[in-house]
Image: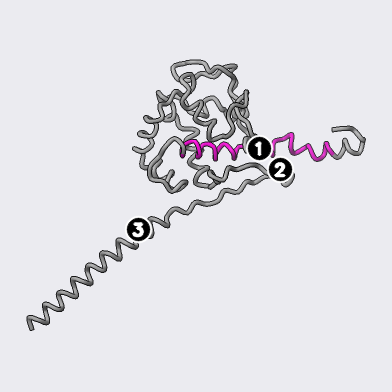
Amino acid sequence: LKMYFRVRNFWLLVSFIFSIIAVILFSSFKSLNSFSPTPYKFDLPQDVPPNYIPPDNVMTVEGVALGRKLFYDPLLSADHTISCSSCHLQQNGFADHEKLSKGVGAEHAERNTMPIFNMAWIGKYFWDGRSGSLEELVLFPLTNKKEMGKDLDVLKRELNRSDDYRKMFYAAFGENQINEILVSKAIAQYVRTITSFRSPADTIYPTAARLMAEKKIDQ
């Protein structure tokens, strides 16, 4: 009888251990497969030419949502008073109404703020074309002392302390640690969604083009 209970207890212990291992493996498998971003699809008129999306920053719904949140968040400035949207005003074509925008500490930027629509169809950025990608562009105003003046190490610490941001970054990029590269990628994704192809001017263009063709007027 004692032998029976010993054997029984042994198999109960083995069963318990295997159950724990199964739970751990299932949790790990679930965690590994919880990163499944949704591809982002542009809603554009048929006559719009193809845009360029860098292969190392594929557009996703989660990435765009994260980029939009970052774009409007003053946390990205040194004193938490301004965001990207403070100078890139939607009502002004995502540009500023001031000749020179004010950054942190009321410092004035050195140049006028550029509009940022249809950026996925442009190959060079800034007025002098010194940046070759949106991802690179983002970090310039972010760290410029006369604009947002943010220390990147401080930014990483602040973002990594936020449960909401950590969840959003993981959903967008499958990464648990937030860094400036992921920040620039997220904002670049959002900026690429800002387009002007359905403006009032675009709605009358087909009719105007047809009338001009009928009158044999060069466009």
The location of residue 32, given as percent across then percent down, is 40, 56
Image quadrant in which the N terminus is located:
bottom left
Badge 1 marks a residue whose secondary structure is: helix
Q: Nearer the viewer, residue 202 or 161?
A: 161
The number of numbered badges drawn on the structure is 3
Up-down relation of residue 104 to residue 8 (above or below): above
According to the image, label 1 marks what residue? 121
N-terminal of the two: label 2 or label 3? 3
Do the residues bearing badges 1 and 2 touch, measured as CB atoms within 8 Å? yes
Three-letter code, disc 1:
Trp
Which residue is outermost to the right? 215
Rendered position, 140 above or below 214: above
Q: CA distance from mark 1 to mark 2?
A: 8 Å
Magenta stretch encompasses residue 185: yes
State the SS at label 3: helix
Instruction: Give coordinates of residue 3: x percent, y percent.
Output: 9, 81
Which residue is nearer to you in this view: 49 or 199? Answer: 49
The span picked out in magenta is 182-209
Q: Which residue is under mark 2?
A: 49
Residue drawn at (14%, 78%), measured in percent from left and top? 7
Residue 84 position within the rendered picture, expressed as x and y whole percent measured from the top left = 51, 29
- Residue carrying label 3: 28
Q: Spatial distance from mark 2 to mark 3, Cα to Cα?
A: 43 Å
Q: Is residue 17 above or below residue 37?
A: below
Q: Amino acid at mark 3?
A: Ser
- Left or right: residue 23 versus residue 189 is left
Quarter of the rendering containing residue 8: bottom left
Circle 2 Cα neighbour tier, 10 Å, few/some/many (<14 / 14–19 / ≥20): few
Where disc 2 sits, the SS reads: loop
Which image quadrant is residue 34 in? bottom left
Q: Residues within 10 Å of mark 3 (few under 14, many from 20)?
A: few
